[in-house]
Amino acid sequence: MTQNELAHPELAGVSVDEGSEDLSRSEVILKGALAAGAVYGTFMVGPFVRKALAMSAGGDVDILNFALTLEYLETKFYEEAKTRAGAKGELKSLVDLIAKDEKQHVEALTATVKQLGGKPVAEPKFDFAYSDTAGFLKLAQTFEDTGVSAYNGAGPAIKSKDVLAAAGSIVQVEARHAAAIRLQNKEEPSPDAFDPSLDEAQVLKAVEPFIA
Amino acid sequence: MPGSKERERTDGQGKSAVARAVKDPVSRRKFMALTGGSAAAAAFLAACGSDDGTTMATTTAKSAGDNETEQFGKGDLGIVNYALTLEYLEAAFYADVVKSALFKGAELKTIEKFGQEEAEHVEALTAAAKELGGKPAPEPKAEFPLESAKAVVELAGTVENLGAAAYLGQAANIQSPDVLAAALAIHTVEGRHAATLNTLLGEPITPDGAFAKPADAKTVLKSVEPFIVG
């Protein structure tokens, strides 16, 4: 994120259209995400009443690109946080660790999309509004919990066993991040016995405010 | 590609993109060239197999070869009952720890909360086994060493990290999307528990790095065997 974009977030949206032929589906949806509520309590209906998933019909590549968009967001967020969040001591180590993990997720997802013959989505421009450590931690918790729910929501729509196993190995790491960030926030690391799942539209709604 | 059978719920597309990519030597070469420099990608992509059998050490469960869950039932029922057995052990462990009076205050609250969540997993998996038309696995009789608070937290950390790895090891074997959704929802909770205990222990929250490693049923069952009595 450049100084210019930080100073003029209202102008940043323009930059999303750069190279618009490459504009990914996810980004288009990100710009126009529909409203949808969270689905905490899916399991209250019955342990195996699954939320009907509104995943795109594009198959594993679309799901991976969707995940890639979220990982771009997290990577940028933690990279910025290294100099912006005022994190010290234990929290600083945690920020560094998570930044490293998220970056590896971006690399892995990018490579996997290519392996499947797809085109990795472009990195959107992000704008994270926070001014202190507490603000950073609050956003971090939202992103990590949303990330967990996004992967969990997409999981059953993944067709390849190998992609599913790989997505599983990422989501467990997201859950571990979520717990660690929640501990920093003095919140329950594991608020529910079942992590809620979110469908694509719900995830997009949650992260849309941070897409410049 | 070995061990990469498509999951059964295909939507009519004959072949997965993975299968297509693997069969296309050009895209594979391109891919290998593109990803050759990234260790993270290599580790992750081990999951996606290799065309020449020289795959990087795999970090994901080989879905073939792990049929240990069959002793608990066929297919998804076996996996659900396997998970149920593990959840019974976790729930019993936390219940014993709570009774042991080794913990007070915030730590006790965390242990109670985790124990309650494991009990909810037991309930959900019991219901799932019935829903699959099967008989839920019986509760194993278990005993845990509860000598000191430190030893208990260490054991809890071991158990939770193993539990998370156990779910990860089964995810790709599950056929029913509903069972999978439930297993995923539990899997990440086990991951949260594991990270919390690792934090208490001063250990890395992500001991496997950016990509969590799975454990197969054989390994997991062997690890919990010492706690099962009779």
Image (tube, rainbow, N blue to C red):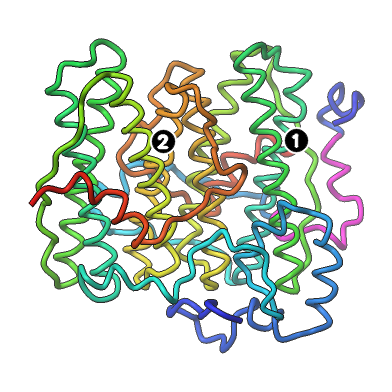
Asked whether residue B220 is in view, the answer is yes
The disc at residue B194 is 2
Q: Tell me residue A210's x, y (percent).
A: 69, 35
* Quadrant of the drawing holding the C terminus of chain A: top right
The residue wearing badge 1 is: A76
Measuring 87% from the left and 63% from the top, which residue is drawn there? A21
Measuring 80% from the left and 61% from the top, which residue is drawn there? B35
Q: Is residue A10 above or below residue B89?
A: above
Rounded to the nearest angstrom, the CA distance separating label 2 from label 1 is 26 Å
Task: Left or right? Give the position of B13 relative to A82.
Answer: left
The amino acid at mark 2 is: Ala
The foreground one among A142 and A174 is A174
Q: Label 1 neighbourhood size at 10 Å, few (<14), some (14-19), many (20+)?
A: many
Q: Tell me residue B102's x, y (percent).
A: 21, 16
Q: Please provide the residue range marked out in magenta.
A: A12-26
For label 1, the SS is helix
The amino acid at mark 1 is: Lys
User: Which chain does the residue under circle 2 lie in?
Assistant: B
The foreground one among B122 and A146 is B122
The foreground one among A93 and A2 is A93
Magenta segment: does it hold A22? Answer: yes
- Does mark 1 fall on the same chain as mark 2? no
Marks 2, 1: nearer the viewer: 2
Q: Tell me residue B167's x, y (percent).
A: 38, 54
